[in-house]
């Protein structure tokens, strides 16, 4: 029994469906994964920043309360400058870490 040949319209329709499914597979699906990746990244940035800020405020409060009269009066600005310095150092470290990854060559 010879196979029935398809008309040009059927072949073009199958080709169009193949192109559409391939385009969906190679563009839409990876974009969904990318959106999830970006969402988790933004959540991590927000929660990490909030945690670092809270730890810095806690350290400043500890300096204010547990140093007694040493950091009172004219020296009450020292805990704030120390907290600002710590945050500045953390920001500098984060900025220095941004860049292309360096692969080790053996």
Image (spheres, helix red, strand yellow):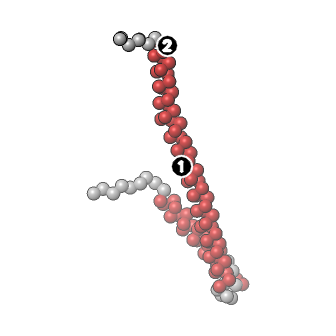
* Within-10-Å neighbours for mark 1: few <14, some 14–19, many 20+: few
Q: Residue at x 47, y 30 (%)?
A: 22
Q: Nearer the viewer, residue 4 or 43?
A: 4
Residue visible at 41% across and 11% down in the picture:
4
Question: Is 28 in front, or is 93?
Answer: 28
**Residue placed at 38% from the left, 55% from the top?**
102
Q: Is residue 18 above or below residue 90?
A: above
Q: Are marks 2 and 1 in contact (CB under 8 Å)?
A: no
In the current view of this chain or complex, which residue is farthest to the front?
A: 1
Check disc 2 and report the residue beneath it.
9
Q: Position of residue 47 (x, y in %)?
A: 61, 61
Residue 34: % across, % down: 53, 45
Residue placed most toward the observer, 58 or 67: 58
Mark sitting earlier along the chain (2/1): 2
The C terminus sits in image quarter: bottom left
Q: Is residue 81 left or right of residue 30?
A: right
**Of the residues tagged 2 and 1, which is closer to the observer?**
2
The image shows residue 102, relative to residue 13, as above or below, that is: below
- Find numbered disc 2 in the image and state the secondary structure of the residue it sits on: helix
Please say whether residue 102 is visible from this viewpoint: yes
Secondary structure beneath label 1: helix
- Pinpoint residue 65: horizontal percent, then vertical percent: 68, 83
Residue matched to label 1: 37
Which image quadrant: the N terminus? Answer: top left
C-alpha separation, residue under disc 2 versus residue under disc 1: 41 Å
Q: Residue furthest bottom?
A: 69
> What percent of the width, then of the height, locates residue 21?
49, 29
């Amino acid at each position: 029994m010879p196979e029935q040949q398809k008309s040009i319209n059927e072949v073009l329709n199958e080709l169009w469906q193949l192109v559409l499914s391939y385009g969906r597979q190679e563009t839409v699906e990876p974009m969904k994964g990318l959106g999830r990746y970006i969402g988790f990244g933004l959540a991590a940035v927000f929660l990490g920043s909030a945690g670092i800020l809270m730890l810095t405020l806690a350290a400043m409060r500890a300096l204010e309360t547990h140093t007694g009269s040493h950091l009172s009066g004219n020296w009450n600005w020292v805990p704030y400058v120390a907290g600002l310095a710590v945050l500045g150092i953390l920001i500098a470290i984060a900025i220095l870490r941004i860049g292309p990854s360096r692969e080790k060559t053996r």
